[in-house]
Amino acid sequence: MLRTRDLIEELADQLITAFFGDRGPQEWNEADILGQYALPLPLLVMMRLMGMDESSALATGHAIHEMLSGGPGARRAAAELDARMRELVTGKEHSPGPDLVSWMHHFNRELHSGLDTHELSEDVWLQIVAGRGAGTTWICNTVLELLTNPDLGADVIAGRCPMEEAMNRVMWVNAPIQNLIGRWATQDTTLGDYRVNCGDMAIICLGATGADPALHAAGHDIARVNRSHLAWGAGTHACPTHDLGSLIVRTGLEVLWNRLPGMRLAVPVEELTWDLPYIARTPTALPVVFPLPPTPPANGHSWTPPHSFLSNPPRPISTRPKERPSAPQGRLPRWRSLVAWWPRR
C-alpha cells in the first residue's frame, strides 16, 4: 500500500501543478476540481496499476468518457473499450509484469478458475470504470462538503477531524453513487409491502438511505464516524476494492488540501449545476479559486504548516547505483498532455 500511496501522491502532485499552466502561479488561481483533478486522478491510478502504457491510457480514457456520456458515439466507444481490454489482457498473458492484470492471470491459473480472455477483460473493464466513477464523485463531493461546511472544513484543517471522517460523512449527506443498476431477484420474495418476483430488476438507491426522513425522525445520527451506510455493500458481493478505493480518494484529497491552502468556491453553491443522478451524482463542474502559497521567508528558515495530512515514513536512501531498465516502464512522463486530453465539462 505504501508504494501505491506514493504513486497516487505523484500523480496528484503533477495534476495540481498543471493547474497553473504555462503562465505559472498567480496571486489568485482558478481550477475546475472535477474536470482537472477528480476525473483524471482515479482513472490514471487504475490505468497505471493495470500496467497500461501512455498511448493506451489516452485512448482508453477517451473511450470511457464517451461511453459514459451516453451520446451518439457511446456504442462505438463501448466496442473500442472492449477491444482494448482484450488486447491488454492478452498482452499481459504473454508478457506479464508487476501489475494487477498479470496477477489476475496468475491467480486464474493457480486457482484453476477457468476464466477465459473475455471474462478477464470484463473484470478489468469493471475495475477501471467503477474506480473512475465512484472515486471521481467521492473526491468532488467531499471537496464540496468541506468548502460549504465551515465547521467540518475548520476541523479538518486543524487536524481535529481526519480526512477519512469527512469522506465518511459524504457517504451519508451526498452519496457518490446514488443508484446501483444491474441487479435481479433470484427468487420470489417480499420487501416491505411490495412483492418482488424472480427476474425483476432491482435498483439499489444508496443515495436515499442517508436522506430517509424516517431515520432522522427516529434520531438516527449520521455523525462523521458512523459507518453503517450501505455504500460498500455487504456479504459475499461486497465491494472487493474498499481499501484501494478509499486510499485513492483519501490521498488525493490530502495532497489537494496540502497544496492549495485557502481554497474556496469560485461561484455561489446555488449556481452549481448537477448531472442527473442515474448512477453517480456530482456537479457538472466544481470551479474553485485559491491563493498563491506563501513564499519561503527571506531569513532562510523554513515554514512548517500547523498540520500536514501526509504522514508517510521517510523513504530509505540507497547508495547502490540504479540499473537502467531494458524496456519502458510506463511512467507516463507527459502529464501536461494527459491533462489536456481530458474533455472539459
Image (cartoon, rainbow, N blue to C red):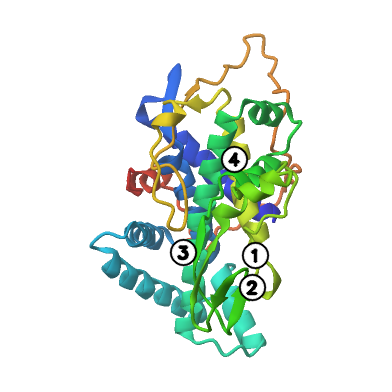
Q: Earlier in the sequence, mark 2 or mark 3?
A: 3
Which three-letter amino acid code belongs to the residue tagged 3? Met
C-alpha span from label 2 to label 1: 7 Å
Give the residue furthest to the top: 299
Instruction: Answer with left or right where residue 110 lies relative to residue 186.
Output: right
Circle 1 sits on which residue?
233
Label 2: element kind: helix
Residue 200 higher or lower than 321, as above or below: below
* Count of labels in the image: 4
Are circles 4 and 3 on residues that touch, CB within 8 Å? no
Circle 3 sits on which residue?
52
Nearest the viewer among 42 and 239 is 239
Query: Which residue is at 73% across, 41% downward?
Result: 223
Nearest the viewer among 66 and 252 is 66
Q: Is residue 145 visible?
A: yes
Which three-letter amino acid code belongs to the residue tagged 1? Gly
Circle 2 sits on which residue?
237
C-alpha span from label 2 to label 3: 28 Å
Instruction: Answer with left or right where residue 26 lies relative to residue 237.
Output: left
Res 339 quadrant in image: top left
Give the residue furthest to the front: 193
Circle 4 sits on which residue?
253
Are circles 2 and 1 on residues that touch, CB within 8 Å? yes
Q: Earlier in the sequence, mark 3 or mark 1?
A: 3
